[in-house]
Amino acid sequence: MNPNGDTRSQVISTYHDHPRFICATCSAVLALQDELISKSFSGREGRGFLMHSATNVKLGKKEDRPLLTGVHTVADIFCMGCNDRVGWYYHKAADLSQKYKEGKYLLEREKMVKENNWKLDE
Ligand SMILES: [Zn+2]
């Protein structure tokens, strides 16, 4: 999929009853509170949240990237509503201790807004 293509019409917004993260730019739902694994990650531009799943995102090119915890095979993820880069997806971790991240999403805190009665503290 071309991460720069126009995918606005594909944005899904059927999560009205759930506490969620929405895109700070276009308000597309990016993830649900229930899918949060950890808030203590580092994104490229500040804090990052590790999530089981993300929605309304599309994957960019796969690449090997040296992160704080070693080299990971990741792909940047882009909001389907506005094409803004909102984090990345972990395809593979080189280090055994980091394998739990595979198949998970790192969302940049700066790119998201909390909506709908979040219960978790900052
Ligand atoms: Zn957006």
Image (cartoon, grey):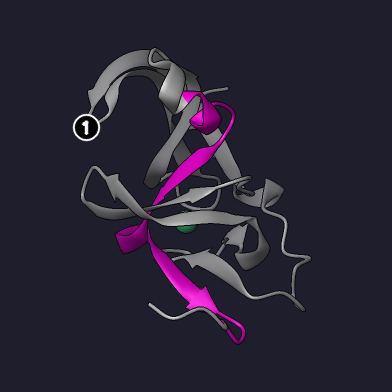
Task: Describe the element under mark 1 as helix, strand or loop.
Answer: loop
What segment is highlighted magenta in the picture? 99-118
Q: Quadrant of residue 44?
A: top left
The quadrant the N terminus occupies is top right
Residue 67 lies within the magenta run? no
Query: Can you say whether 74 is above or below 108 in the image?
Result: above
Residue at 61% in and 66% down:
33
Question: Residue 54, how many percent across, how many down?
Answer: 60, 47
Question: Can the viewer see residue 3?
Answer: no
Q: Going by the image, does 81 lie left or right of 109?
A: right
Residue marked by disc 1: 68
Specify few, some or many for label 1: CA neighbours under 10 Å numbering under 14, 14-19, or 20 or more.
few
The quadrant the C terminus occupies is bottom left
Residue at 77% in and 78% down:
17
Query: Can you say whether 80 is above or below 113 in the image?
Result: above
Pick whichever, 18 or 10, lies toward us: 18
Question: Residue 37, how many percent across, how many down?
Answer: 54, 53
